[in-house]
Amino acid sequence: MDSYRMNCRNVSGNCRNRTCGNMTGNRESMIPMDSTSKTCTNICDRIGGPHMSTLSYSLTDLSPEHQPPHQHLRYVTSSSFGSDWNGVLHSHDCTELFYVTDGEGWLCTDETQIPLRKNNLVIVNPKVHHTERSSPEKKMHYIVLGIDNLQFRFHEGETFSPFQIFQLSSHREMILSLLHTILEELQKKQTSYEEVCQHYLSILLLQLHRITGKEFSFAPPTDIPYECQRAKAYIEEHFHEPVTLERIAAIVHWDKFYLSHQFSAAFSVSPINYLLQLRITHSKRLLCDTDYSITQIAESSGFSSQNYFTQAFKKLVGVSPRAYRQKHQK
């Protein structure tokens, strides 16, 4: 179970734990899974008119024979936000599928706020800091699934993506049918309901892949820290710019020395050497496929000068950029 759900904190009077029954300020109504009776207890009526209502079911206590070999549905939550609900940035060690059934709001991350609309599907990969906010005018309703042993790769060759948003208006009926079936199975708890939920999850994932085409693929889970993955993704996106270790460390909110140590442990290369490798790889393509001058290639590959580019290239490749071009240019 992820640390956020294990260690719920009240921030400004708001508890954002999806399976916690801790309410403050009449903000949230949860229906937690009772570990003894396996029945749901609605505490909404006891606190009187909450601004956020939630139905939440946990599948974390499946017996070993019920555990599927791959992805595992950890929890399902059906919620509605009030306009005064203020979410707290948090992360999970599982992937979340977040479907907006009605209303509007925002997905908030460390760096940005992305508008959400009815029929948006949001996929949030593990260890990504995020929260949700509802529009004051149009209260947001959503269903969210927590899925273990799964993360998404949204672009071919990509090592890490924090999240992706899809508009599924034309597939609303099918998506809601699958989600409501899972919720109904968890409510009724008939024989083999756990297996049924897992099978419907598999169908949902396959349907999403079919709907979105090749826009995402399933990737194996990873133990690499989120900050290292984020740093790597930042380097890959900005290698042609004046990137420094200090800048990368500031992006992930780590000390630069700690980042360098953790990044090297995760990827067997330091952040700066990885940056240099990307720049050299990019310059090789330009040397082979274009008629750009050496100075132009150095600049477009992120090097501060032609001299530095030539020195770095020769050190890593073994020959000068000019000699490499003469040998490999088409």
Image (cartoon, helix red, strand yellow):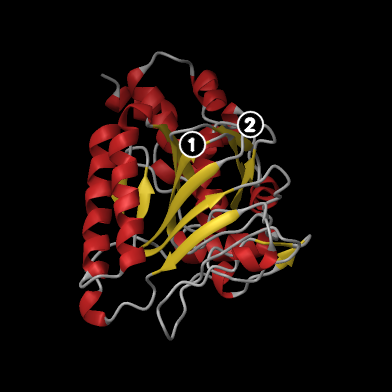
* Quadrant of residue 114 within the rendered picture: top right
Local packing at callout 1 (Cα closer than 10 Å; few below 14, some 14-19, many 20+) is many
Local packing at callout 2 (Cα closer than 10 Å; few below 14, some 14-19, many 20+) is some
Q: Which mark is residue 222?
A: none
Residue 214 placed where, x, y %?
A: 27, 34
- Asked if 300 appears above or below 49 in the picture, the reply is above
Image position of 80 (left or right of 167): right
Q: Nearer the viewer, residue 72 or 318?
A: 72
Q: Nearer the viewer, residue 25 or 321?
A: 25
Residue holding disc 1? 279
Q: Which mark is residue 304?
A: 2
Residue 194 placed where, x, y %?
A: 27, 69
- Residue at 28% x, 55% y: name it: 201
- Residue at 65% x, 68% y: name it: 46
Image position of 194 (left or right of 18): left
Residue 272 placed where, x, y %?
A: 57, 50
Kind of residue at badge 2:
Ser
- Regarding residue 294, the answer to whether it shows in the image is yes
Q: Nearer the viewer, mark 2 or mark 1?
A: 1
- Regarding residue 162, the answer to whether it shows in the image is no
- Residue at 42% x, 76% y: name it: 39
| Sequence-first tag of 2 and 1 | 1
- Asked if 67 appears above or below 153 in the picture, the reply is below
Across the whole image, how many numbered discs are drawn on residues? 2
Image position of 271 (left or right of 267): right
Q: Quadrant of the C terminus?
A: top left
- Asked if 54 appears above or below 117 in the picture, the reply is below
